[in-house]
Image: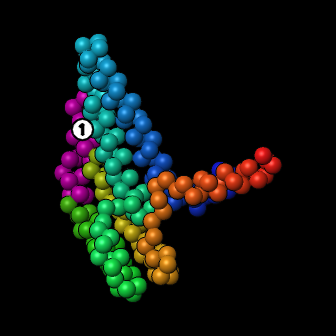
Amino acid sequence: MNPEKKDWKYWLNEWESYVSAVLFIINTVLLITQVISRFVFKHSITWLEELATFLYLCMVYTAIAAAVTHRKQIGIDALPNAMPYRIRKILLILADVIFIIFDLWIQKGLWGIVKLMGKGGTPLLGISYALCYGIVAVSLLLTAFRCVQDILRLMKENEQELGKKKPTLDLDAYEREYLESVGKDGN
């Protein structure tokens, strides 16, 4: 998709992917800095590890919602793919429903932990433990919402496109884009 064609719907569906990617990059830089500091300068920057842990938590749970959006979550495809169309559709919808039930069931416990943590925070940076567990809870609610979106998508899909996952690296799309650009330029 060309950058000029990306509208608000695109960003609404893709923001989790971008947030988790940025958090991954920041986390990588922090951890490399910590390793260099520890082994080259013989000094540990202790707060970096705490911040990296918090960012990792945010990254993972944001990426779960992104994975559901792109149908990249872990699953066993052998059984549904061996079934006829209607049964496969039912199994895929049932998998999303089970994921939603889990996401909603765990909410009570997570919000209980948030209340229990109160104003306590991490030792060095003082990042609220309630914030940490709250991020997990909100991210799982977002994941449940993405599962509902997937169910609605599954209900509309025909037999050929049912449950299809776009490849992580779509070489055919890159080739089409390249051929279009060459055709436009006349090269």
Check the image and name the residue furthest to the right: 186
Determine whether 111 is above or below 45 in the image: below
- At label 1, the amino acid type is Gly
- The residue beneath circle 1 is 121
Name the foreground residue: 178 vs 23: 178
Q: Position of residue 133 (x, y in %)?
A: 27, 50
Q: At 59% from the left edge and 57% from the top edge, which residue is drawn?
A: 173
Mark yes or no: residue 173 visible. yes
Q: Position of residue 187 (x, y in %)?
A: 78, 46
Secondary structure of the residue carrying numbered label 1:
loop
Mark yes or no: residue 97 visible. no
Q: Position of residue 108 (x, y in %)?
A: 23, 64
Q: At 49% from the left edge and 53% from the top edge, which residue is drawn?
A: 169
Determine whether 158 is above or below 147 in the image: below
Q: At 36% from the left edge and 67% from the top edge, which residue is drawn?
A: 144
Magenta extent: 110-130
Q: Quadrant of residue 55?
A: top left
Q: Is residue 60 left or right of residue 70?
A: left
Check the image and name the residue furthest to the front: 187
Name the foreground residue: 110 vs 28: 28
For the N terminus, the quadrant is: bottom right
Check the image and name the residue furthest to the top: 41
Asked if the stretch drawn in magenta spans residue 129, the answer is yes
